[in-house]
Image: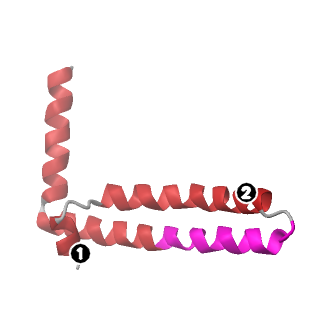
Amino acid sequence: MIQKLHDKGLRSEHAYTAGFVSIGLSVAAWAASLAAEPGRGLDRADRWGIFVGEWAPTFFGLGVALSQYEQQDGSLAAEMRSLQERERQTV
């Protein structure tokens, strides 16, 4: 499954970014639920925040798996060399 995701273009950086975004969305969902549904109380807002917050560990785990695959595949090292070459050219 990890190989197929990598072949489709998903990289570890994408999964890590999604994990951090989901943490922000968790806070936003909590605040939005608290403001948009004032009669429902804090419990409902907490449930929304927790629901979205549970996505973060999944994305981070996927990022770790993709990172390990990229290291074994050699694509991570190739990307680093490419970045270093671009950096040298701009300096």
Which residue is depicted at the point 34% across and 57% down?
Answer: 14
Name above or below for residue 89 compared with residue 35: above
88 to the left or right of 30:
left
Image quarter of residue 70: bottom left
User: Which range is magenta?
Assistant: 39-57
Question: Which of marks 2 and 1 precedes in the sequence?
Answer: 1
Which residue is depicted at the point 17% across and 48% down?
Answer: 79
Image quarter of residue 85: top left
User: Does the stretch in magenta take in 53?
Assistant: yes
- Asked which secondary structure carries label 1, the reply is helix
Which residue is depicted at the point 87% across and 68% down?
Answer: 39
Q: How many marks?
A: 2
Per the image, the residue denoted by label 1 is 2
Name above or below for residue 44 compared with residue 19: below
Per the image, the residue denoted by label 2 is 31
The type of residue carrying mark 1 is Ile
Which residue is depicted at the point 23% across and 75% down?
Answer: 2
Residue 64 lies, in percent from the top left, at 35, 69
